[in-house]
Image: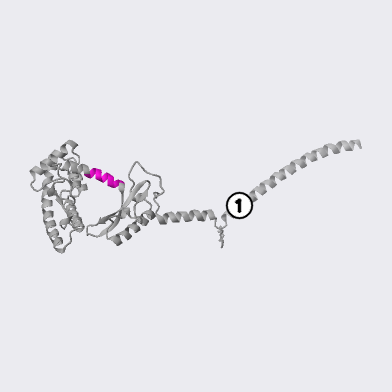
C-alpha cells in the first residue's frame, strides 16, 4: 500500500501540473477567441448603414429661445451701439452712422411731422414735442437738405459739427477778407469760403491774407471773403433751389472743393494764383445764369 501511494502521489502531482497548464492554455485561447469575436462584431457594425432618428416633437430650451430672439432683434434693428443711454464720448465727434437706427428713425419722424406742419424746421429745437436728442453725450438736431433738383428733405446733424464748422468758417472769413471792416451780411459767397480754403490748402498761415489781397487787386471780377461784391443776398430772388443749382454747376465746372484740393496738391503759391483765372471765368458764366434766374424769381414774387 505504501508502494502504491508512493507511485500515485508523484503521478497525481504531475497530473495537476499538466491540468493547470492545460487550463491556462485554454483560458488564453478563449480570451483570444472572445477578443477576435468582439473585433469582428465591431467591424460588422461599422459596415452597416447608419440611420438618424427623426423626432416629431422637440422640447426647446427657453434660454436658447431667448438668445435666438435677441439675435433676431439685433439683425432687425441694425443696432449700432449708440443710444440716448450710451456713455458720453468726449474725445471725438460721433458719426450718425454709429447711432442706433431706431433712435434716428423716431427723431426723424418727429422732424418730418414738424416740417409737414411748418414747411421748414425753423424753431424745432425749442419745440417741446421735437427738440433735440442726446446720444453718447452729444446733441443731435434736425436740418433741411436741398438736393441738386431742389427737393427738400429732413436730415440729422451732430451739433458738435456745427461748432467745428463755425470755427473753420470764421477762420476762412478772416484770412480771405481783405478789408476787416467787411462783414458777412447773409446769402451766398460767389467765391465760396470752402473753395477759397481748398485753393490755398497747403500754404502757410502768414501767406493767406497776402494771397487774397493779390487776387483782389489782380482780378477785376474777383472779390474774395466778405467783400460786398462777393455776397449774393437771398432776398433778391436767390432761392434755395437756385442755390443748389449754382453749387451743382460749380462742381460740374471742376470747382468742387474736395477735387480742387487734389488738383492743387503740391502746387506753389504762384500756380495756385494762376488757378484763379479758371475760377474767374467759371464765376462769370454762373453770374450770368444767376442774374437771369433771380430776375425770373423776382417777377414771380419768389424771393427765398
Quadrant location of the C terminus? bottom left
Residue 44: where, in percent of width, then height?
Answer: 60, 54
For residue 302: magenta? no
Name the side, left or right, on which 164 lies relative to 291. Answer: right
The image quadrant where one finds the N terminus is top right
Compared with 259, 109 (above or below) is below
Tag 1 secondary structure? helix
Q: Residue 287, image x and y in percent?
A: 12, 54
Q: Can I make out residue 171 in this image?
A: yes
Q: Residue at x 68, y 46 (%)?
A: 31
Q: Residue at x 16, y 43 (%)?
A: 176
Residue for badge 1: 42
Q: Quadrant of residue 152?
A: bottom left
Q: Which residues are magenta?
A: 160-169
**Quarter of the image holding residue 23?**
top right
Q: Residue at x 8, y 42 (%)?
A: 217
Amino acid at each position: 500500500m505504501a508502494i502504491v501511494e508512493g507511485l500515485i502521489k508523484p503521478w497525481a502531482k504531475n497530473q495537476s501540473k499538466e491540468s493547470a497548464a492545460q487550463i491556462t492554455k485554454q483560458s488564453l485561447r478563449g480570451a483570444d477567441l472572445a477578443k477576435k469575436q468582439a473585433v469582428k462584431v465591431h467591424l460588422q457594425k461599422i459596415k452597416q448603414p447608419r440611420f438618424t432618428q427623426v423626432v416629431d416633437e422637440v422640447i426647446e430650451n427657453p434660454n436658447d429661445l431667448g438668445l435666438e430672439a435677441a439675435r433676431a432683434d439685433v439683425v432687425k434693428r441694425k443696432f449700432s451701439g449708440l443710444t440716448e443711454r450710451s456713455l458720453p464720448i468726449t474725445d471725438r465727434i460721433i458719426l450718425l452712422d454709429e447711432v442706433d437706427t431706431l433712435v434716428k428713425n423716431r427723431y426723424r419722424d418727429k422732424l418730418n411731422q414738424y416740417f409737414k406742419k411748418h414747411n421748414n424746421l425753423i424753431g424745432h429745437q425749442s419745440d417741446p414735442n421735437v427738440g433735440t436728442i442726446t446720444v453718447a453725450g452729444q446733441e443731435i438736431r434736425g436740418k433741411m437738405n436741398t438736393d441738386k433738383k431742389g427737393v427738400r428733405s429732413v436730415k440729422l446733424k451732430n451739433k458738435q459739427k456745427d461748432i467745428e464748422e463755425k470755427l473753420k468758417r470764421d477762420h476762412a472769413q478772416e484770412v480771405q477778407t481783405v478789408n476787416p471792416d467787411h462783414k458777412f451780411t447773409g446769402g451766398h459767397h460767389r467765391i465760396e469760403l470752402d473753395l477759397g480754403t481748398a485753393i490755398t490748402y497747403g500754404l502757410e498761415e502768414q501767406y493767406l491774407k497776402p494771397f487774397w489781397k493779390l487776387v483782389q487787386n489782380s482780378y477785376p471780377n474777383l472779390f474774395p471773403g466778405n467783400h460786398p461784391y462777393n455776397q449774393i443776398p437771398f432776398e433778391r430772388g436767390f432761392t434755395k433751389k437756385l442755390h443748389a443749382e449754382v453749387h451743382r454747376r460749380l462742381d460740374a465746372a471742376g470747382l468742387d472743393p474736395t477735387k480742387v484740393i487734389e488738383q492743387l496738391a503740391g502746387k506753389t503759391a504762384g500756380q495756385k494764383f494762376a488757378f484763379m483765372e479758371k475760377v474767374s471765368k467759371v464765376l462769370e458764366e454762373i453770374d450770368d445764369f444767376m442774374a437771369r434766374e433771380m430776375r425770373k424769381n423776382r417777377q414771380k414774387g419768389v424771393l427765398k
